[in-house]
Amino acid sequence: MIYMDNAATTRMRPEVLEEMMPYLRDCYSNPSAIYGFAGEAKAAIDKARSRAAEILGVDSDTIYFTSGGTESDNWALESAAFSDSEKKHIIVSAIEHHAILSTALSLERRGIRFTYIYPGKDGIVDPEKIRNAIRPDTALVSVMTANNEIGTIEPVAEIGAIAHEKGVLFHTDAVQAFGQIPINPEKMNIDLLSASSHKIYGPKGSGLMYIRKGLKFHAFIHGGHQERDRRAGTENVAAIVGFGKAISMAESDMDERIKKETAIRDHMIERLLGEIPDSRLNGSRIKRLPNNINVSFNGVEGESLIILLDMKGVMASSGSACTAGSIDPSHVLIACGNSYEEAREGLRLTISKDTTLEEADRTVDMVADAVRQLREMSPMYS
Ligand SMILES: *Cc1c(COP(=O)(O)O)cnc(C)c1O
């Protein structure tokens, strides 16, 4: 079996599990308790917080642990929407993850206005379109650092600069980029940033939000005093510890990993486009995550391709995990100007730090076989 769905989730590093184990077994105290035993759990959370702060080049007290990327995204939009009664307008890109887009729909039902910014055909959002959409009542701009389907790396530093010029908050969903490529919120004009553990070889159910120092920002989950009154609920200590370990390991091997993944990615793209007729790459060729390959083959439905690849032992996706299982066309491919037909043709292959060249080649061979098979059966392709 070859796992080519690392944008959906990754396999935990063994060292991560090892570091988590004591907090699942012996060190079970509630970190908020005042006896000495609780100190260990509290210290472990602090260590994870320092590791998260270090990879972003920020102070520890800007990091808040959450249950994952989805909660952080919900938090950013919900709090920004209700922090100033004069500001009831939010700008998001049309290619955001559903954690942003579904929250937007929910807020629209409660009177918040949204503007959706469409990217170019290459999946890159033009910062000038953001500038033109900002109004006096705009509370927040939210554009993802990198897209989960087509892997595009968005010009967030430029978008953040424009937002700040106009006195508007800037949030970025960095779930696909955090730990994968360098990010510095201060240098990139980011006020709020979402990240997730299970996309970087950490445990599921853990994430974080970076909140720029001095920002007035309401809690979203209400209850106890955890996370300095900003995120209530007893901390998921083991998952936070695992997330911290995954972050520190991601920081140590980032340069090497980017080099290795980029080489395999480019090799796969070159072969897929070169050897399979009527194929195309989705998303920018250059401004692209090192681990993302998203290709379409004329007349071949992504869903059928994935089922056939599964039978051959390759696990792939047609887009985001949330749309898999339904035959909805990809909202990302549609936003990039594709027809409904074309938006059903995407195949996403996302490699990991451990993917070998041999696995990459075997995958390409199987994709080529599968495409040939499907086209032979298809009345739509001749
Ligand atoms: C996976 C993902 C999320 C959701 O994160 P979870 O930790 O799974 O809740 C949000 N945004 C993007 C871009 C993602 O890829």
Image (cartoon, rainbow, N blue to C red):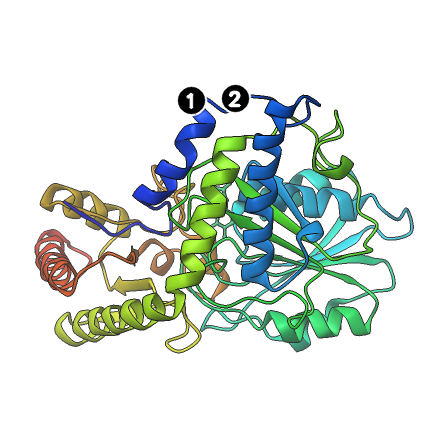
Counting from the top left corner in percent of width and height, residue 381 is at 17, 61
Asked whether 73 or 110 is in front, the reply is 73
Asked whether 240 or 143 is in front, the reply is 240
Image height of 186 relative to 4, above or below:
below
Per the image, the residue denoted by label 2 is 28
Asked whether 148 or 112 is in front, the reply is 148
Per the image, the residue denoted by label 1 is 25
Q: Dot 1: what SS?
A: helix
Q: Are marks 2 and 1 in contact (CB under 8 Å)?
A: yes
Residue 373 appears left or right of 27: left
The residue shown at (35%, 37%) is 18
Q: CA distance from mark 2 to mark 1?
A: 7 Å
Residue 279 appears left or right of 210: left
Amino acid type shown at disc 2: Tyr
Counting from the top left corner in percent of width and height, residue 112 is at 78, 46
The residue shown at (10%, 51%) is 377
Counting from the top left corner in percent of width and height, residue 21 is at 39, 30
Amino acid type shown at disc 1: Arg
Image height of 271 relative to 301, above or below:
below
Counting from the top left corner in percent of width and height, residue 264 is at 23, 69
Residue farthest toward the front in the current orientation of the protein: 36
